[in-house]
Image (spheres, rainbow, N blue to C red):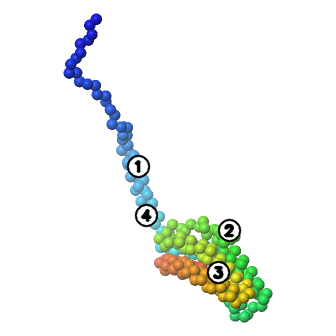
């Protein structure tokens, strides 16, 4: 048999190449559903925008809550400083000095999250969303820091001043106490400034926590 004749000038074979994965087209109703959800989200946000009265109520609740959590630590700070002032004024006996040291040491321990459930509770407390614009979450963090380590340091210093047996040791302990009191009071000032700004904006007369120093 004769071989098939070669066809001259025949076009060369070019395989068809895919340009990539096919691009699925979303049905029109999908876009309508997404648009509807966006409209609903906007409407819900508008409907739930808290009034000033509601924010004021939430602020009162906030102040009551944080005051309750910090008061046991704050009370110890006040008692420790009072004991120190009485000793420095010459109003205490040796047994009272010993009692003052014990009060200060126990107070320092009571300001730690690990030993005080109320301070630990502050670490997980969430401020109401209606109060977001007043930066009160920073107040919660500030109170935790005021307690530990600031208040702990001050009360430890008080115990060291009371326990000092020489003038040099007492002078060194008092210098450390004064420096830590400055830190404690700066923290208190920052807390008070934020709280008072929120109280003024919402016409709330209820005071925030009392933080001695």
Residue located farthest toward the top when viewing the structure as drawn = 1
What distance separates the C-alpha of mark 1 from that of mark 2? 50 Å
Locate residue 66 relative to residue 170 in the image: left or right: left
Q: For the point 49% across and 69% down, which residue is it?
A: 132
Q: Quadrant of residue 23?
A: top left
Pick whichever of labels 1 and 2 is earlier in the sequence. Answer: 1
* In-image side of 98 versus 117 (left or right): right
**Looking at the image, is mark 3 or mark 1 earlier in the sequence?**
1
Tell me whether circle 4 and circle 2 mark residues in contact (CB < 8 Å).
no
Residue furthest to the bottom in view is 90
17 over 81 or under it: above or below: above
Q: Gap in Å between the C-alphas at discs 1 and 4?
A: 20 Å
Q: Earlier in the sequence, mark 1 or mark 4?
A: 1
Q: CA distance from mark 4 to mark 3?
A: 48 Å
Which residue is at a point 40% across and 49% down the rendered structure image? 33
Between marks 4 and 3 in the image, the one whose residue lies nearer the viewer = 3
Lower sequence index among marks 4 and 2: 4
Disc 3, SS: helix
Q: What residue is disc 1 on?
A: 33
Q: Which residue bears the numbered disc 3?
A: 154
Q: Are marks 3 and 2 in contact (CB under 8 Å)?
A: no
As drawn, which residue projects farthest toward the right?
A: 95
Residue matched to label 2: 114
């Amino acid at each position: 048999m004769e071989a098939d004749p070669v066809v001259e000038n025949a076009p060369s074979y070019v395989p068809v190449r895919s340009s990539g994965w096919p691009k699925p087209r979303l049905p029109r109703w999908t876009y309508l559903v997404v648009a509807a959800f966006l409209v609903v989200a906007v409407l819900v946000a508008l409907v739930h925008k808290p009034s000033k009265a509601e924010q004021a109520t939430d602020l009162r609740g906030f102040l009551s809550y944080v005051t309750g959590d910090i008061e046991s630590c704050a009370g110890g700070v006040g008692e420790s400083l009072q004991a120190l002032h009485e000793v420095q004024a010459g109003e205490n006996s040796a047994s009272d000095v010993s009692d003052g040291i014990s009060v200060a040491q126990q107070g320092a321990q009571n300001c730690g999250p690990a030993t005080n459930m109320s301070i630990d509770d502050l670490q997980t407390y969430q401020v109401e969303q209606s109060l977001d614009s007043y930066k009160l979450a920073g107040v919660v963090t500030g109170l935790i820091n005021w307690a530990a380590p600031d208040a702990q340091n001050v009360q430890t210093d008080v115990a060291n001043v009371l326990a000092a047996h020489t003038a040099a040791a007492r002078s060194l302990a008092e210098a450390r106490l004064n420096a830590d009191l400055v830190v404690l009071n700066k923290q208190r000032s920052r807390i008070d400034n934020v709280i008072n700004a929120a109280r003024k904006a919402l016409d709330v007369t209820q005071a925030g926590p009392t933080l001695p120093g």
